[in-house]
Image (cartoon, rainbow, N blue to C red):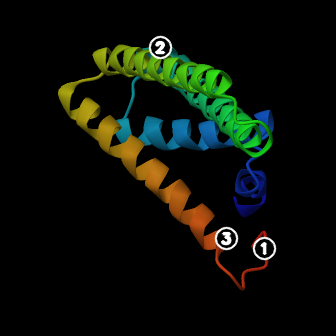
């Protein structure tokens, strides 16, 4: 698991890493929620779409923030900065809207107990992933990317 997380540490998640993380998430989710075959057939594609949406949003956001850094360092043009901030805000709003719609579609296919487990799982999975990345980044660890 640590090996496929290395590109995450350097901000370079590739398709293969996204697929691995998504596969782990789906396997755990399927088992935890005790999904039946019909639910699996409908929910798994939506979970994949949700993860793709998140991946694309965070990749675009990193790029836009890097553009803002460059603009600030080179030629802090107010018009350009406003335009980039506006684009970032619109992108964030659109992401939140699409993410909410996908989560709603998934939750509609689940029982009340499964919905609660789904919400808890989403939070716990993200926390576990962040903790793992933080541990890998700790000074003194072989995988620490350095200063």
Q: Are marks 2 and 3 in contact (CB under 8 Å)?
A: no
- Percent across and percent down for residue 30 are 46, 35
Quarter of the image for the C terminus: give it: bottom right
Disc 3 target residue: 137
**Local secondary structure at mark 3:** helix
Q: In the figure, 7 relative to 45: above or below?
A: below
> Could you say which is closer to the camera, residue 56 or residue 35?
56
Image vertical order of residue 63 relative to residue 9, above or below: above
Q: Which mark is residue 146?
A: 1
Disc number lying in front (1 or 2):
1
The x, y position of residue 26, in whole percent, is: 53, 35
**Identity of the residue drawn at 69% across and 29% down:** 77
Earlier in the chain: of badge 2 and badge 3, it is 2
Q: Is residue 62 above or below residue 142?
A: above
Q: Nearer the viewer, residue 138 or 52?
A: 138
Quickly name the residue at label 2: 42
* Residue 103 visible in image: yes
For marks 1 and 2, give the CA distance.
Answer: 43 Å
Q: Quadrant of residue 70?
A: top right
How crowded is the residue under tag 1: few (<14 C-alpha within 10 Å), some, or many (20+)? few
> Does label 3 or label 1 sit earlier along the sequence?
3
Residue in view at x 67 percent, y 23 percent: 80
Residue 79 occupies which quadrant of the picture? top right
């Amino acid at each position: 698991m640590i090996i496929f997380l290395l590109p995450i540490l350097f901000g370079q998640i590739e398709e293969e890493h996204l697929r691995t993380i998504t596969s782990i998430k789906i396997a755990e989710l399927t088992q935890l929620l005790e999904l039946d075959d019909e639910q699996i057939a409908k929910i798994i594609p939506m979970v994949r779409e949700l993860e793709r949406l998140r991946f694309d949003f965070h990749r675009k956001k990193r790029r836009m923030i890097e553009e803002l850094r460059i603009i600030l360092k080179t030629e802090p043009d107010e018009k350009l900065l406003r335009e980039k901030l506006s684009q970032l805000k619109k992108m964030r709003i659109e992401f939140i809207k699409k993410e909410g719609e996908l989560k709603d579609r998934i939750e509609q296919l689940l029982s009340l107990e499964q919905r609660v487990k789904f919400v808890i799982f989403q939070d716990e999975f993200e926390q576990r992933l962040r903790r793992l990345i933080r541990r890998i980044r700790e000074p003194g660890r072989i995988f620490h990317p350095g200063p």
